[in-house]
Image (tube, rainbow, N blue to C red):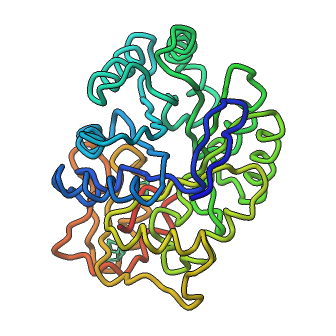
């Protein structure tokens, strides 16, 4: 697969990366052997860019996939930690768990808005220090927020941005309201012009656009300023399909089989607004003891009605 330079980092990444969250316990919950097998297959087929996070608990899959191979993928990790010490611990944990002297890219995970950015100042200071010591090679933020992309693209120490975009604009936020696809497109373009390396997430809107597979990928491929898109794979054949898209050999009528899809609510993203509970015709969503929405899989018919109304795109079909 074609590789391109990621902004000014000097790091070359493939057009498609592997979002490792998918194989982990919060999504497909594959065994380490199964998940590592899918990851290794992606590496064998030429994908060189892996996205993980402290919160995903997916380091063992990557370690296992790389064991005994010569693959040296570009690894992105990130932490929700706010303080210097929590970020420092996150970097150290990643280096140990992945058996690496350095992590290629480390991010502030899911920066939500301006005060949130300010609360992360300790963690950001730590990332800058880690880079100066060679413990990480490039630093930046992941975010669903168009206003955070706008703000951080003006910060010279930021090397990379990992924003959310898809052809329906699902899940784009701007402060406490929704942002639009057009706004995110414009900010991505500006950030890329400022030299930031951009790779994007939620091309399929958390699984809600998977039925529009080719359209969703084509939209992102044609956007100005984007070097790579992270896609979550759970099966070998999904990797084959994406390679066919990239080399132009995919069946133009191709549609993925969605019959085995399940609904999951990301407990880290859910803000407990209750909109999905009201929307579900089958009373399959309830508030757990933390006030966060959860799905009762005995009742859920995977109709998907709840997902598009979630303001933070916390409802995922996988
Ligand atoms: S997919 Fe349908 S049945 Fe399942 S939780 Fe959502 S709205 Fe309810
Ligand atoms: S709509 Fe989204 S944020 Fe609101 S309770 Fe449901 S999952 Fe949580």
Residue 225 lies, in percent from the top left, at: 76, 49
Q: Is residue 34 left or right of residue 272?
A: left
- Identify the residue at image location x=57%, y=74%: 245
Question: What quarter of the picture does the N terminus occupy?
Answer: bottom right
Residue drawn at x 48%, y 56% is 46
Q: Nearer the viewer, residue 240 or 191?
A: 240
Q: Quadrant of residue 236?
A: bottom left
Count the marks: 0
- Which residue is at 50% across, 28% downward? 106
Q: Quadrant of ligand 2?
A: bottom left
Question: Image check: 66 left or right of 32?
Answer: right
Residue 81 vertical placement versus 200 (above, below): above
* Residue at 70 percent of width and 51 percent of height: 226
**What x and y, as percent, mark residue 234?**
32, 63
In this orientation, which residue lies closer to the viewer: 35 or 258? Answer: 35
The quadrant of the picture occupied by the C terminus is bottom left
Residue 34, above or below 262: above
Give percent across and percent down for residue 142. 55, 38
Nearer to the camera, 58 or 240: 240
Residue 197 relative to residue 241: left or right: right
- Quarter-of-image position of residue 145: top right
Position of 97 with respect to 162 (left or right) is left
Residue reaching furthest to the bottom: 253
Q: Residue 123: x and y, percent?
A: 49, 17
């Amino acid at each position: 697969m074609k590789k391109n330079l990621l902004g000014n980092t000097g790091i070359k990444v493939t057009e498609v990366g592997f979002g490792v969250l998918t194989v982990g316990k919060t999504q497909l919950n594959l065994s380490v052997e199964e998940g590592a097998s899918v990851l290794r297959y992606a590496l064998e087929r030429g994908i060189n860019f892996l996205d993980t996070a402290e919160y995903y608990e997916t380091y063992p899959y990557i370690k296992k996939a790389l064991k005994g191979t010569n693959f040296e993928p570009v690894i992105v990790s990130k932490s929700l930690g706010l303080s210097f010490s929590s970020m420092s611990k996150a970097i150290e944990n990643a280096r140990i768990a992945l058996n690496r002297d350095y992590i290629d890219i480390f991010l502030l995970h899911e920066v939500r808005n301006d005060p949130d950015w300010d609360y992360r100042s300790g963690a950001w200071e730590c990332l800058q220090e880690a880079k100066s010591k060679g413990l990480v090679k490039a630093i930046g933020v992941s975010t669903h927020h168009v206003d955070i992309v706008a703000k951080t693209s003006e910060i010279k120490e930021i090397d990379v941005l990992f924003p959310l975009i898809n052809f329906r604009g699902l899940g784009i936020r701007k402060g406490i309201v929704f942002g639009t696809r057009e706004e995110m497109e414009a900010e991505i373009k500006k950030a890329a012009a400022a030299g930031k390396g951009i790779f994007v997430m939620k091309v399929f809107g958390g699984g809600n656009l998977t039925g529009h597979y080719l359209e969703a990928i084509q939209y992102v491929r044609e956007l100005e300023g984007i070097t790579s898109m992270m896609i979550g794979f759970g099966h070998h054949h999904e990797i084959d399909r994406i390679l066919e898209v990239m080399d132009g050999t995919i069946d133009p009528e191709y549609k993925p089989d969605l019959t085995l899809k399940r609904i999951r609510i990301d407990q880290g993203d859910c803000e407990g607004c209750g909109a999905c509970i009201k929307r579900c015709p089958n009373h399959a969503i309830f508030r757990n003891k933390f006030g966060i929405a959860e799905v009762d899989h005995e009742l859920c018919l995977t109709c998907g009605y709840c997902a598009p109304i979630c303001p933070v795109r916390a409802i995922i079909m996988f």
